[in-house]
């Protein structure tokens, strides 16, 4: 046997074994290669609109900051699933801790167990590494809106510090477009974000301009956000509009909102 034949007899089977043993190769955490379900927000928005079209009372759960806490996220999903009164779920951002692709995928796969349609916003931790690209791939545009019954839900990227003022955050051009094109029949609005005004991560140079924009939306009910990892209710601008913060999922709690033609109420649900 020649040396070449000997090498071929050893190396070729070895290479085939290595290539077939995919588990031996670990992808780079920021490779941004996403397998499985994508464009979740758009599909969920369609389901929410269809399922709530003729409803006067809308009930939704608001969770946020599930980063690292996979077991607690599973328990939150189980708790929401056992209820019969929730129309949809909003995730307020920070699905990941380091913006790594596998973090988004793991959280996505847990949240896909929800029986209700759900959407997810971008959090400041989600901006790290290639996280923004992965988030957009899995969920869709960073600013978006959807309707539920007669309520408009406006979901915004407010993670200004992560963009170093290189992009408009909040995006007033997007808000201009929403205000100019409110769907027919809308009576109220809920605004969701990750970082609230007056937080270090928010562009507070335009905080009051931001609130002036929100007041142009029809029947602004409240603003909801995550980020701070604790439950809080504040009238940040002293204008009667409450900003409600849901705890991080490690606290094993989420907010449950009930919207009616006359307004809304909320409760902190522990699980």
Image (cartoon, rainbow, N blue to C red):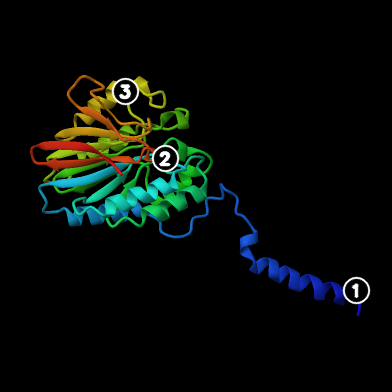
Residue at x-position 62% and y-position 55%: 26
- Res 207 label: 3
- Res 240 label: none
Q: Distance between the residues labelled 3 and 2?
A: 22 Å
**Residue at mark 2:** 94
Pointer 3: residues within 10 angstroms few (<14), some, or many (20+)? some
Image check: 79 left or right of 55? right
Decide if residue 182 is in sight here: no
Classify mark 1: helix, strand or loop.
helix
- Res 3 label: 1
Q: In this view, does 269 lie above or below 162?
A: below
Q: Earlier in the sequence, mark 3 or mark 2?
A: 2
Classify mark 2: helix, strand or loop.
loop
Residue at x-position 36% and y-position 31%: 195
Instruction: Locate the N terminus and report the quarter of the image it occupies.
Output: bottom right
Q: Which residue is nearer to you in this view: 167 or 65?
A: 65
Q: Which of marks 1 and 3 is nearer the N terminus?
A: 1
Q: Which of marks 1 and 2 is nearer the N terminus?
A: 1
Q: How far apart are marks 1 and 3 (CA)?
A: 74 Å
Q: Which residue is farthest front?
A: 271
């Amino acid at each position: 046997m020649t040396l070449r034949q000997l090498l071929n007899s050893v190396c070729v089977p070895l290479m085939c074994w290595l290539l077939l043993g995919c588990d031996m190769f670990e992808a780079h955490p920021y490779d941004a290669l996403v397998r499985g379900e994508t464009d979740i927000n758009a599909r969920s928005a369609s389901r929410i609109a269809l399922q709530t079209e003729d409803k006067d009372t809308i009930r939704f759960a608001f969770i946020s900051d599930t980063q690292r806490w996979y077991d607690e996220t599973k328990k939150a999903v189980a708790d929401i699933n056992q209820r019969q009164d929730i129309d949809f779920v909003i995730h307020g951002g920070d699905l990941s801790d380091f913006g790594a692709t596998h973090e988004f995928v793991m959280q996505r796969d847990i949240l896909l167990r929800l029986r209700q349609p759900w959407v997810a916003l971008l959090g400041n931790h989600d901006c790290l590494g290639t996280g923004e690209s992965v988030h957009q791939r899995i969920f869709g545009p960073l600013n978006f809106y959807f309707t539920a019954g007669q309520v408009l839900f406006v979901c915004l990227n407010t993670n200004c510090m992560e963009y170093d003022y290189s992009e408009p955050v909040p995006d007033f051009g997007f808000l201009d477009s929403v205000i100019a094109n409110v769907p027919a029949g809308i009576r109220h609005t809920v605004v969701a974000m990750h970082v609230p005004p007056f937080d270090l991560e928010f562009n507070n140079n335009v905080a009051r301009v931001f609130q002036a924009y929100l007041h142009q939306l029809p029947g602004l009910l409240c603003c909801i956000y995550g980020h701070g990892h604790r439950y809080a209710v504040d009238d940040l601008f002293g204008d009667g509009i409450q900003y409600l913060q849901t705890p991080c999922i490690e606290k094993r709690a989420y907010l449950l909102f009930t919207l009616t033609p006359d307004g809304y109420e909320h409760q902190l649900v522990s699980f």
